[in-house]
Image: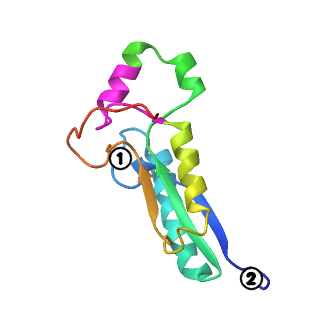
Amino acid sequence: MKGLTNKRLLVTGGANGIGRAAALRFLEEGCKAGVVELSRTMARELAPVVRVLSISPGAVLTATQEAEYSDEMFAELDGEIRLGCHAQTEEIAALFAFLAIDEAPSLHGTSVIVDGGETAGELASQCRPIV
């Protein structure tokens, strides 16, 4: 740790590894939960020199999904998301960028969940596009 100052470690976990388990996916979900707990442990051990956070995205719209999923598949998946739509990759990238700057110095040892309310409960509202 000698020579390190004001460093950040951003780790990607998964929202389902925190608040909502998916059937028949125990290995994947267990690994996501393990990544979140690993980042919490690292936060305890590496502070104050390294600030550690995990980002736990839920459903994120990717080019692969757009190419492979039918409208019916999107409708079914989006129906499980409280805001009614997948996150955009730009949203996740913007979060990583924010967490890496000096304006968020107290964020440490936690996981930021970006899942459109999947782990929150009832339907919250309808998704609005990013402008």
Q: Name the residue under label 1.
A: 21
Question: Residue 77 at what x, y percent from top left?
Answer: 37, 28
Within the image, what quadrant is residue 103 found in?
bottom right
* Horizontal side of residue 101 vs 117, given as left or right: right
Question: Residue 110 at what x, y percent from top left?
Answer: 46, 67
Using a 10 Å C-alpha cutoff, classify the residue at mark 1 as few (fewer than 14 neighbours), some (14 to 19) or many (20 or more): some
* Horizontal side of residue 46 vs 125, given as left or right: right
Of 97 and 87, the residue lying toward us: 97
Residue for point 58% across, 54% down? 96
Q: Taking 81 as reference, is 93 above or below it? A: below
Q: Does the magenta stretch include residue 60?
A: no
> Magenta region: which residues?
74-87
Residue for point 32% across, 43% down? 118
Mark 1 belongs to which amino acid? Ala
Question: Residue 74 at what x, y percent from top left?
Answer: 40, 21
Of 13 and 2, the residue lying toward us: 2
Of 74 and 88, the residue lying toward us: 88
Q: Name the residue under label 2.
A: 1
* SS class, disc 2: loop
Mark 2 belongs to which amino acid? Met
Within the image, what quadrant is residue 42 found in?
bottom right
Residue for point 42% across, 33% down? 86
